[in-house]
Image (spheres, grey):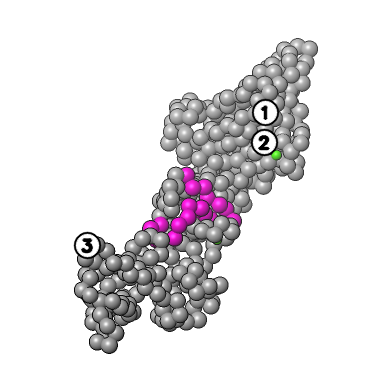
Amino acid sequence: MSLRFMSCEIRIKNMKSNICMTIVSAVLAGWLATSMAWGTTKANVPETWDTGLQSWVTERLEGQLPTVQNIGGSVSIVFNALTTANPETARFGAGQNGSQGMFYGNLAAVGARGARFTISSIIGNPTLQLVIKNQVSQRSWRCTVSVPPAGETITLENMFDIQAGWTGDDSPYLRDADKFKQDLNSVTLLAIEISGDTATRQGCTIDNFELIGPYMAGLVSYSGAQKGDAINIVADDGIKGVPTSVQGTSGAYLIDHAPAPGSYSLKAYIDINGNGVMDYWEPQGVYAGNSFNLTQIIDQADITLIDPTKDGVPYWWLAKKLGINNQAQADAKSGAEWVQQYAQTEFTINSIKHENGKVALQWDYIPSVQLQIYGSSDLAGGFDTIGSAFESQDSTGEGKTVVEVEDNGAAFFKVKIVQ
Ligand SMILES: [Ca+2]
Ligand SMILES: [Ca+2]
């Protein structure tokens, strides 16, 4: 009895120990697999096959393996004709190694919204499906792809939305939107499944396969004095946005091909002189949310453009009126000193006597100053103030200030900067 008891006890201990070991190794393996892959999952980065097949794998499901070749920088998948008609099905897929793992891992974490690719060179009448397989649940999901007529090339977008025609292979969850979404969290395979009847040749060519990722969008607005409509929106000085509804100097923009994930800063400017770069005096602004990691749609990245200034005096005015070439030169004096220099050398007033008993005074607009008008009937008697001090305005929108004063017999006028 005693020996039997002992033997039983030992077995239980060993079982416990085995169970424990199994759990530890499973968790460890899972962690290693995901941590290696997650760093490489990328959306908005196409697999162009311009340099080969990038480790995509062909897997036979039924019948023969198709011939997979890189032809002219795109991938061609063809079932050759046999003497007997048999159904042929194979997967051409990207797992962890395919395209450096771009389509593997946590697709949701990079904001992947679908898959996009071009398809052409249709041979026969192949059936194509997109397939996503989850590493943890082991569920697969598939979506039928519309095949273009022979001779045509089309770009297809299949969104990762159960409503877009995805069906699961796990019978309780065939059309379960939540499970489908959840299964994007740990994708072990993204593949194109091609089926054909090999009594005839079946095939197609695929290029520019990518995960459709998050986009950035917002409004750009400008209400300053400069004129121009060449609004440029730039992410990190490299990726240009597209103005989508810009009228004049304001409107909406979209950037939909920035690789995700990725750290971005957004800026916008109006390219007044059309030289393709942001000059120090051009209307400009940045997104208040800079910088950010692009892993989901950013759809309110609004940017307000302002005229950059030196002490409130716009750089554009310094460039135009005083020929200042660069920001360092503009910053070498205070705004007030620049205005004073301009007023002493360039400033003249035109007066026009109107029939209605008023005199219109006009001069070149000086930004950011308070002005006071003075009048004198005969210089000998000195000048008296006319009205009160006021903020300088671009009255015409063309760089002129116009002020009407009562014609009280003054023959001479002067305008003084009071602040
Ligand atoms: Ca290509
Ligand atoms: Ca420019």
Q: Earlier in the sequence, mark 2 or mark 3?
A: 2
Which of discs 3 and 1 lies nearer the camera? The answer is: 3
> Is label 2 within 8 A of ligand 1 (CB to nearest ligand atom)?
yes
Q: Secondary structure at mark 1?
A: strand
Q: Nearer the viewer, residue 2 or 246?
A: 246
The residue segment tinted magenta is 222-244
Q: Amino acid at mark 1?
A: Ser
Horizontal side of residue 145 vs 359, given as left or right: right
Q: Earlier in the sequence, mark 3 or mark 1?
A: 1
Which of discs 2 and 3 lies nearer the camera? The answer is: 3
Residue 374: give x, y in percent of width and height.
Answer: 27, 79
Residue highlighted by disc 2: 207
Are the residues flagged by discs 3 and 1 in contact, CB closer than 8 Å?
no
Q: Residue furthest right?
A: 83
Q: Nearer the viewer, residue 82 or 317?
A: 317
- Residue at the image position 51 percent from the left and 53 percent from the top: 230
- Residue at the image position 45 percent from the left and 29 percent from the top: 163
Residue highlighted by disc 3: 356
Q: Nearer the viewer, residue 226 or 197?
A: 226
